[in-house]
Image (cartoon, rainbow, N blue to C red):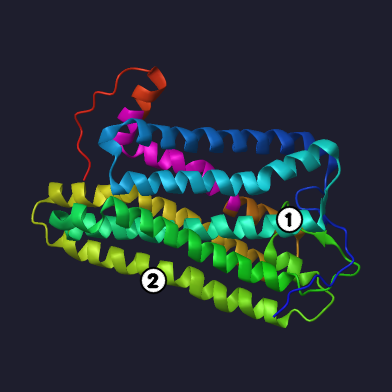
Amino acid sequence: MKFKNHTDVLEFILVGLMDDPELQPFIFSLFLCMYMVTILGNLLIILAVSSDSHLHTPMYFFLSSLSFTDICISTTTIPKMLVNVQSQDYSITYTGCLIQIPFSLTFIGLENCLLAVMAYDRYVAICQPLRYRIILSPYFCVLLVLLSLLISTLHALLHTLMVLQLYFCTNMEIPHFFCELAQIIKLACSNNFINTFLIYSAGNVFFGVPIVGIIFSYTKIVISILRISSIGGRYKAFSTCGSHLFVVSLFYGSGLGVYLSSAFTKSSAKNAVASVMYVVIPQMINPFIYSLRNREMKIALRHLISGKPLVCLCHCI
């Protein structure tokens, strides 16, 4: 099939969170601070893991990959919004929108896959600890991340190529601060049935399979933990999963909030706020979750920030 652009539209207008001009300085400052915290927090996680040999394990390799993905998600959406607020020009070119869609879908999809991979990592560590290093070899870990990236990219390209078939005519206002796929499709003057069908069908499979994998992994983990006789042993085993469970709940919980918001409300402000909870807040909070709940990460970050030699007696699972 030959994909061809069927529109004369030159630009879209991003109207999300832009209703009240008096709030624009506050919104700019707030998003700038959140973006800087996101970049700094996730970058510190990556540097801490790479600089401490005690953290060169599959769990922390996947955590570094998640931090890099969080940086990419925020960088794909927030800088453009900051430029729009600062310049009081809320437009984005048609080409720019088509570039933003696949990148945002790719990195959000990659985070979705990485969370499932991290659940599998915890499953192997707790249920098959003696084979942990054998199963999750460095080669296999890299392969899992690359496979997740490939699947996410293909999923994003599928939707982007289908958007190229749509025709846009009059209403070019997007009720979000970035080019969200579902909102772009709603603006089309041509028949968008196939695009809508793909969002729900491919989206349900793409996000549903990792969710099922996470549930399966933690079901096995809970069964394995209940077999441990000592309460201290149970707590120690389950404590290694606490941070990941928190991040999973935040990511999918905010995603469900976006879905419900778009389905049951027509308010552009509420839809935009829901999207902020999905593509901004989790990426900013993730580093704090892992650093505050993880002793090894605290030690690595302390030595990284202080510049002292890394002398860590801890041992990761």
Depth order, front residue of 37/46: 46
Any magenta on residue 209? no
Q: Say which residue label 2 marks.
A: 212
N-term mark: 1 or 2: 1
Is 310 above or below relative to 223?
above
Extreme residue toward the left, this view? 229
- Give the magenta range: 279-300
Task: Mark yes or no: residue 23 visible.
Answer: no
How many circles with numbers are drawn on the protein? 2
Is 46 above or below relative to 11?
above
Task: Mark yes or no: residue 276 visible.
Answer: yes
Binning the other alpha carbons within 10 Å of mark 2 as few (below 14), some (14 to 19) or many (20 upward) gives: few
Q: Is mark 2 on a helix, strand or loop?
A: helix
Q: Say which residue label 1 marks.
A: 176
Q: Is mark 1 on a helix, strand or loop?
A: loop
Q: Position of residue 249 (x, y in %)?
A: 44, 57
Q: Where is residue 131 in the image (x, y as percent from the top left)?
A: 16, 57
* Callout 2 amino acid: Val
Left/right placement of residue 30 relative to residue 291 reads right
